[in-house]
Image (cartoon, rainbow, N blue to C red):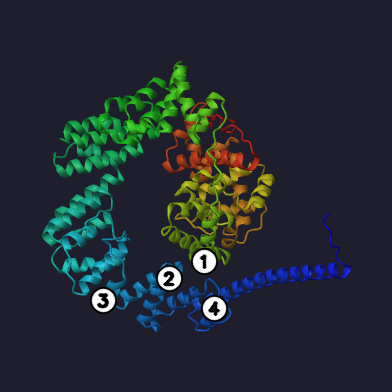
Amino acid sequence: MRKIKIQSKQQVFAWHKLIALFLFISVNANIYAVDKIESQRKAFKEAVKLAEKAKPEALKYKNNLLKDYVLHSDIEAIYLRNSLKRQPNKKIQAFLAQYPDQATSNDLHRNWLDYLYTTRQWKTYIEFAPDPSTIKLSIQRRCKYLEARIRNLQEVDFVQEALPLWMVGNSQPDECDPLFAILKNNNLLTKERINNRIDLALERARFKLASYLAGQLLEKDRKAVNSKITLWRKMSASPESQLKQSLKWKDGETSRAITAYGARKLARQNVDKVLTIWPKLTKKFKYSVAEKNALENYIALRSAYKRHPQTLAVYASANTNSMSLREREWQVRNALWNQNWSSVLSAIQDMPSSSQTTSQWRYWQARAYAQLGEKEKAEVIYSELASGSGYFEFLAADQLNSDYQFKHTDLVVNDAIQSQLKQRLDLRRARELAAVNMAGRSRSEWRSALNKMSAEEKTQAGYLANAWGLATSSIQTAVNSSAREDYDILYPRAYQKSVQSMAKRFAIEPAWIYGVIRQESLFMHDVRSSANAYGLMQLLPATAKQTARKNKIKHRGYSDLITPSKNIELGSAYLSEIQKRLQSNPVLATAGYNGGPHRVRTWLPEQHLPADIWVENIVFNETRNYVQKVMNNKIIYAWRLHGKTPRLSSFMHAVQPKEK
């Protein structure tokens, strides 16, 4: 029988002391690590402020407290960027060579190139500027690069490389003026080329540019050109009256161009009037077949936009073989608006086969079959669609009252690759940049890292981004890898406390708030749009101010708009408000959030209309796609949050007619 050795009380006590000591050391080590990183982050922010003022003291932080900090090189980059006049080029070159892929290095590189250009250091500029023939650059960069090559006496093919930048129908950026001056000094801006560009400008209604170009012609050539510009201006200002007067003009290339422009302009203003005068114009002017078809197709399109009662007849008289995909799609949409289901079917069948097979047009084909009593054909298509996941797929499932088929698959985590990714300097930098409120640079650093990964590494990187709380990078990584099937990664639940709280406060679904955030900003809390909208829920400053006042929310301006909790509060309040203003209909409110409540009111029908038809007929492509994606997001987030989901059709209420 085995003997059991019994430990003495002293031995047990000794072991307890040893374990306690180990735990004490471990806990304090963790506390020290946390304290250290927080101290470094604080010091980094202080150093950045100094570096942005070009203060050399910033580098002391880099070389002392921050020497082992993952972002230590950023301080030097920011300092160099703000002190270019004092720095030798070799120092900039050395830094860029040592840290080629960092977000702050990219900023430094751009600023340095601008400095080299301004100081006319052409040789160095050419050496370090990206070549437009190998990478897509902005117009400004392309113009500067060509100018630098010319100034550096390098051979340039003016006709192939420089003239295409000049020969456009709009004004180019000021940065291109020196290059264009070189073209002029080399007698390349001939009378024929100037006239050609004037015609391009007139076609785009850029009358100031046309007049400016006319001023570059010899005085004897200006009179006729200025007369032509005057006719274009008059046609733009009063298309109806000018088209009537044009019936007295002689036929000619210029007359046809001006009247075609006028007909397009009038079609945007008044479909009835263009339908009246267009037959007279075709009798007077000998438009080419292509010109005539293009104009008639455009009139048909504008008729559909305006929901004109003669739209189907206008389409019937047009040459559908010459129609663009957009014009064909609006033929279907107009038939849907009028619920002319046989016309819906025939219009879809006239579309290119590649379009007919998309879930969008297959859904509408099934809807038409169902309305025409061909239920078996409809159910076959609905069943095929309902096996997928998406806006039209969910609508199809609703028609069958079948369960939604979410395409969620948990990613298989590769521990070895995860361990490698966590040690990568570029990913660690991206994580830390987010921690110090440099979210834009964090995203840039992450994208740059993805370009150097294998397919499997990208997939695993999506999981890591989500684990690290980098919601935007999580989604962007998943979309471009097999991780897109993992909804934890593709549909993150960041800011959940704020979302849940505001949903309860303003009596709207948290899934709806998430759906809007994902579509508006992709969880970029610091982003500003070209329309000057800010933050997670993309609020305009005026809208935020007005919403805050109505809901008695404290609002300090810009800083609140890029503060996640405050942006969610204001955005949720606004979403709830416009829902109440727009028939308490989530579909109308979602459209109003993107396109503006005032526009939604103008899009209302004359009679009750199913919501799916109304959404399909939203005139703005952006708003239509936005509503469909937010509705899709809403369904998926409801499932993610609650494990079950309402029917999409349950909140796609029929749209009520406009008030008369």
Dot 2 falls on a residue whose secondary structure is helix
Q: Earlier in the sequence, mark 2 or mark 4?
A: 4
User: Can you tell which quarter of the image residue 3 is in?
Assistant: bottom right
Return the x and y of residue 104 as percentages of the image width and height: 45, 69
Residue 535 in view, yes or no: no
Secondary structure, mark 1, is: helix
Identify residue for label 1.
429
- The disc, 3 or 1, on the residue closer to the chain's N-terminal end is 3
Callout in the foreground (2, 4): 4
Q: CA–CA distance between discs 1 and 4?
A: 14 Å
The residue singled out by tag 2 in the image is: 105
Which residue matches tag 4?
Answer: 67
Spatial CA distance of label 4 from label 3 is 35 Å
| Amino acid tagged 3 | Lys
Q: Amino acid at mark 1?
A: Arg
Which badge, 1 or 4, is on the more N-terminal residue? 4
Which one is in front, 148 or 246?
148
Q: Is residue 156 visible?
A: yes
Q: Mark 2: which amino acid? A: Ser
